[in-house]
Image (cartoon, rainbow, N blue to C red):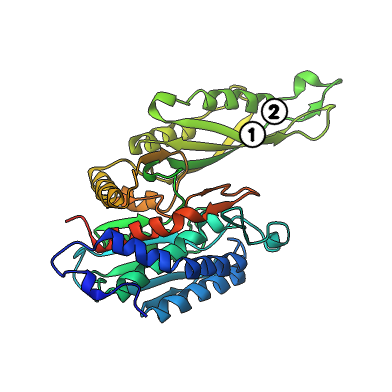
Amino acid sequence: MEVFPKSAFSPDACVPMRALLTGARRKESALLEMIQTLVRAESPSDDKAAVDACGALVAAHARALGGRVKVHRQRAFGDVIEARFGPRRKSALVNRALLLGHIDTVWPLGTLKTMPCRVAHGRLWGPGTLDMKAGVAMALTAIEMLAEAGSLDREIVLLLNSEEEVGSPVSRPITERLAAECSAVYVLEPAQGLAYKTARKGTGNWRIDVKGVAAHAGVDFEKGASAIRELARVVETVSGWTDLKRGLTVSVGLAGGGSKTNVIPAEAWAEVDVRIARKADGARIERKFSGLRAADKRCTLAVTGGINRPPMERTRGTVALYRRARTLAAELGIALEEAATGGASDGNFTSALGIATLDGMGAVGEGAHASHESIFIEHLAARTALLAGLLANPVE
């Protein structure tokens, strides 16, 4: 059964947004059901079997829509799902679009017992609803709408990664290779409020291990070299690299050390989170960490880590995608804003390659990674229609 008649579209005209909204509203019940099915398929990043089971559900649905599914097999993490829709394209770019998302969550198996998947108070609740199984279901629904309307005129690649929440260690090269074949990337992460995201900070992680000299704190105090005191100096040093005007933050989030109160501590450690808004700051902060030295020459430092996601900067290509989205949203009576965020996504990788990337195109809600994670149902149809509209009306 068609969502709307093919006669509503002209081959030479843009796909009408109002028709897409009508179609999305008709599919809202099925969309909600799909989201709930995916949420109930718990898929923590560190459980390959669970992630693969969720991925199998998505792959089956994609095949049912006529998608050409390829499963990128992994050993340590869940398999990565790639599905292509629309006409096959062999040449590079040709206005091919990449829909980018992930099926893993931060929630361990069994979370549904304390955070059940349920509909109440205008929301759909449950672990992974907002981040980001609703976005996955929205993408599949948008593709289905265009296929039924006979408007799937460009090749669309849907890539769903299995370990985004732990840094995308195996999916990054797949993401970058497929993105290089596309003219635009649409990231299915949650919205920033109601806004699409046009910029994200890059991320880095470091660990600092300090070795000192143990000694009796009362008998041989002067013979000891405190690793904790040295670490305190280091913490002050790296924290001082924060530059809010540049969007650069350095935060020591975890620290520890020592053995007993009456022993000069011989070991201490810290783990550091770094966020950068500018790509150039990545190399600069890496040089600073590599140049750390102990003030007390009896202590030694071991510094490991680096930038693991480059920033998604607000490029011309991304702005062009946002402006097209804003125009289409206006046809639905939506004033679509843009936003920047300190969090990172796989869209950081594609943007750093110079490919126009628009993020935050998934559901509207709150509580990602929190016990009140939920999406607002009232926004689902319009956001899905807007996603479909962008796929059908690309930036030339």
Residue located farthest toward the left when viewing the structure as drawn: 12
Question: Is residue 39 placed above or below 352 in the rendered structure?
Answer: below
The residue lying at 66 percent from left, 49 percent from top is 371
Q: Could you say which quadrant of the image residue 160 lies in?
A: bottom left
| Foreground residue among 222 and 57 | 57
Crowd rating for badge 1 (residues with CA inside 10 Å; few <14, some 14–19, many 20+)? many
Q: Secondary structure at mark 2?
A: helix
- Residue 210 marker: 1
Residue ID for mark 2:
228
| Foreground residue among 253 and 257 | 253
Q: Secondary structure at mark 1?
A: strand
Question: Is residue 63 placed above or below 9 in the rendered structure?
Answer: below
278 relative position to 288: left or right: left
Amino acid type of the residue tagged 2 in the rendering: Ile
Image position, residue 357 (x, y; %): 31, 51
* Residue 159 visible in this rendered orientation of the protein: no
Question: Is residue 7 placed above or below 318 in the rendered structure?
Answer: below
Crowd rating for badge 2 (residues with CA inside 10 Å; few <14, some 14–19, many 20+)? many
Amino acid type of the residue tagged 1 in the rendering: Val
- Chain-order first, disc 2 or disc 1: 1
Image position, residue 221 (x, y; %): 79, 20
Q: CB of mark 2 within 8 Å of CB of mark 1?
A: yes
Q: Quadrant of the C terminus?
A: bottom left
Image position, residue 219 (x, y; %): 86, 20
- Residue 226 marker: none
| Foreground residue among 102 and 263 | 102
| Foreground residue among 348 and 325 | 325
Q: Quadrant of the N terminus?
A: bottom left
